[in-house]
Amino acid sequence: MSYKIEIQSLSAWFGSKQVLQDITMKIKENLVTAIIGPSGCGKTTLIRCLNRMHELTPRAKVTGRVLLDGEDIYSENVDPVTVRRRIGMVFQKPNPFPMMSIYDNTAAGLKLNGVADKHRLDGIVEKSLRAAHLWDEVKLELGKSGASLSGGQQQRLCIARALAIEPEVILMDEPTSALDPTAAAKIEQLIRILAENYTVVIVTHNMQQAARVSDFTAFLYLGKLVEYGLTKDIFENPKSELTEKYITGEFG
Amino acid sequence: MRSYSFRKLEDRMMISLAYAALIIALIPLISILVETVGRGLSAISFSLLLEEIPPLGQPGGGIGPAIQGTLIVVALASIMGIPIGVFSGIYLAEFRQSRFASVARFLNDVLTNVPSIALGIFGWTLIVVVIGWSVIAGAIALAIMMIPIVTRTTEEAIKLVPITIREAAIALGVPQWKTTLTVVLSSTKKGIATGILLAVARISGETAPLLLTILGSRFWFSGFTQPTAALPLAIFNFSQSPFRTADLPRAWGASLILIFIVLAINIIVRYITREKYG
Ligand SMILES: Nc1ncnc2c1ncn2[C@@H]1O[C@H](COP(=O)(O)OP(=O)(O)OP(=O)(O)O)[C@@H](O)[C@H]1O
Ligand SMILES: [Mg+2]
């Protein structure tokens, strides 16, 4: 099995404040990699560096390399827009476009990039909503506002929206933190299914969730990568004392 | 600790005070409306709307050219002022922290407060002196009045769009400029429309800059480089006329029509930009 993403000596700053320090890790293709760590340790920043969203924040800076299929996404001739089409993102809080219908939300990435073929859009919208396990709940009301759905449904809509542009990697930033356990369970199931076709990187606060859904786990602390390996090893056999303390709930 | 009944009394007094202030604020507004409708309505007729403007004191005629002139000048000013204002507002919102943006924002605020007569003189010196009293000169002066209002309200409206919406689009691989022009603008349509309305309403009633630029006329529109009539000028002339019985009703009629035009633009813009959900 090959590596989809290779992070090499990645450091990140907000202004003069360094929040990621020299992170190096390789992310395997078609598996789920979880990033865990206490609040403020840099999890969100790390995944935002993977699709070049970090640099959108004023005065934010990144150094190091991130290879996607062996090619550095930070090299000068790479357009961040292309990177973002290959690496989709689902945010911590569901953020459907409030002024768009369910259909338009799902098709947004394509429509905004100029796809107008109704037939093709119809097909992709259905496929993406099915993949996000939302289709059966919304198929009769695709014209309804995306904001009128429940929180869990909205998050699945955001997943469908990310899938519709057919990315290769999906980044998820605490996708279930705003949801109740039932809705969260649905998203977790979904993540497992997605891993059959996509490389998934998920940030989570929830240790059980990391253990349930991920194949690999990275533990981040104060902007440093403390430990990274098979989820099973991290949870049953952590090498670092810090990791052990964190997963047993001694701090965090 | 004050007693509960005392606090309740205090509460009531504050509410009554606020209520009274509101009533006082509404009295002049309502009386203007009542007066204008009452006096204006009886002056309105087909010939008032459709005929050329008579010399002061003469019977017959109407204010047709003034209605036409106002519509043309305001439309032309809007065609120039709205795009410039909206795009400047977008720029200021998108490049918030750039040095140029803060200078531009400051100048824009200064421009908002320039008295309209000063803009009239500006239009007069720069345009009228060169090409003569003209529709174009008036439209430019009014456009200059609109721009800072539209710019400011557009900027504020865009700033209110949550960053999460913008990021959602960017993360989908939508280029930044396109994100702004589609997702951001469409979720702030109402805010921008409000700014445009404010600006249009404001310039529709302006008299001072028009006196110095379009001059006024009694005849129908005869070209963009010619003087033209306008409602505020007609209201001004008729109300200052020594022939009160003949001309004062015309002034009220013209006022009512001006209010009606502003109201109609308001309703149309609100209808066009109404939100599908919400
Ligand atoms: N826009 C910003 N400007 C300045 N500093 C920021 C900004 N966003 C985050 N930070 C800082 O960067 C550090 C890492 O933040 P990050 O959001 O990556 O943490 P996180 O691990 O995702 O935390 P959480 O679990 O609470 O979401 C924090 O110390 C935070 O204060
Ligand atoms: Mg976070």
Image: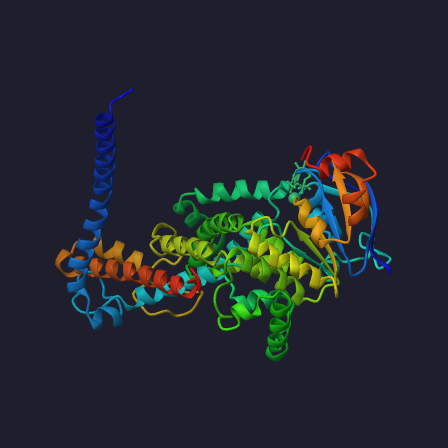
Residue at the far front in the pictured view: A236
What color scheme is it? rainbow
Of A245 and B233, the residue lying toward us: A245
Considering the image in quadrants, where does the N terminus of chain B appear? top left
Residue at the far bottom in the pictured view: A119
Judge whether A22 appears above or below A178 on screen.
above
Residue at position x 56%, y 49% from top? A178
Q: Does residue B50 appear to the left or right of A204 in the view shown?
A: left
How far across and down, in percent of the image, does residue B237 sit?
25, 56
Residue at position x 19%, y 66% from top? B44
Judge whether A217 appears above or below A31 on screen.
above
- Find residue A51 and report its image quarter: bottom right
How far across and down, in percent of the image, does residue A198 sit?
74, 63
Is residue B175 visible from the viewing direction of this image?
A: no
Write down which quadrant ligand 2 falls in.
Answer: top right
Of A171 and A215, the residue lying toward us: A215
How far across and down, in percent of the image, does residue B34 sit?
18, 54
Of B2 and A74, the residue lying toward us: B2
Of A72 and A246, the residue lying toward us: A246
How far across and down, in percent of the image, does residue B74 sit?
40, 61
Considering the image in quadrants, where does the C terminus of chain B appear? bottom left
- Find residue B54 and report its image quarter: bottom left
Q: Does residue A29 appear to the left or right of A122 in the view shown?
A: right
Is residue A52 visible from the viewing direction of this image?
A: yes
Residue at the far left in the pictured view: B245
Q: Does residue A69 appear to the left or right of A220 in the view shown?
A: right
